[in-house]
Image (cartoon, grey):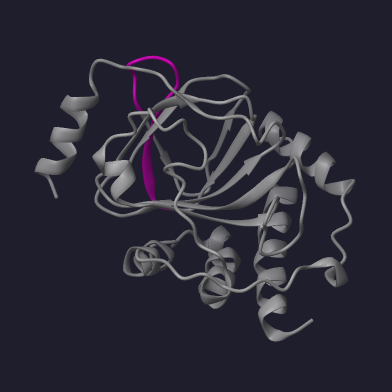
Amino acid sequence: MNDKQHRIEALLQSILRLLEKRRGEALGVDLILDKLAAMDLCPEQIGDVQPQATRHDEVLMKAIAGIKAPELSRIASSLHAAKDDLVWREDNAQFYPPSADLGAGYTKCNLHTILIGPEACGYTHEDFSLGIFMLGPRTLYRDHNHDAPELYLNLSEKSGWRFGTHQWQDYPAGSLIWNKAGAPHATRVYDQPFISVFVWLENIKARCNVINFDDWTEIEQYLAKHE
């Protein structure tokens, strides 16, 4: 492997080691680890892709710098080292129908990179996806669902979540969020960018569906007012 591949492999292994430590804490962790165990993740199999930078690099650097929890320190340092080796993409059109109303905040600043999955920086897999996801500060990721069961490992200090109701709850760094297939969920981001590990376990080519809630405008106006 070249130096770039070593850095990507180190990032991936830092994530997998933490998930292994958290085995049994959420249904999705065990399912994901079981699927990973069946994959050929030998270092010799890691790809050598051309990096792709992002217009959101300043926000991304701030998000990585904001990963402060001690248990996440290895992920933070590995992500910082590998940031410029990765392929960063925005997902406005990739995962949603063209008519989906995602809101101005989300389309303004969202970002992801894939470490395992189709067109991955690391290992190719056609029906599994593991990577890093970021949202800009003061953003509402509107309520939506998808056929892919999904796990978030939150890296940023605080983010707001709701699951099919109007009730919001804040989650700290290191928390695990498991969204079973079809389960509605939404995220709101406060002063600092939101960054997380995400995994889609299967059905990753199915489109996402936006689920209308009547308080989007109120939430987005509140977030914008406090920029």
Give the magenta-colored segment's residue range: 156-168
Residue 126 vertical placement versus 150 (above, below): below
Residue 82 vertical placement versus 59 (above, below): below
Please identify the dominant SS of the magenta region. loop
Would residue 74 be found to the left or right of residue 128 on screen?
left
Q: Residue at x 56, y 30 (%)?
A: 207
Can you give x and y, in whole percent of width and height, for residue 104 in the image?
25, 40
Can you give x and y, in whole percent of width and height, for residue 168 in the image?
34, 25
Would residue 177 be found to the left or right of residue 205 on screen?
left
Residue lying furthest front in this view?
Answer: 98
Q: Residue at x 52, y 62 (%)?
A: 70
The quarter of the rendered structure image containing the N terminus is bottom right
**Closest to the observer: 124 or 10?**
124
Would residue 144 be found to the left or right of residue 3 on screen?
left
Residue 209 vertical placement versus 45 (above, below): above
Can you give x and y, in whole percent of width and height, for residue 178 in the image?
59, 31
Q: Residue at x 85, y 66 (%)?
A: 45
Residue 134 vertical placement versus 7 (above, below): above
Can you give x and y, in whole percent of width and height, for residue 94 in the image?
51, 42
- Residue 99: image quadrant is top left
Q: Is residue 166 magenta?
A: yes
- Residue 57: image quadrant is bottom left
Residue lying furthest left in this view?
Answer: 225
Q: Is residue 59 magenta?
A: no
Q: Residue at x 38, y 28 (%)?
A: 100
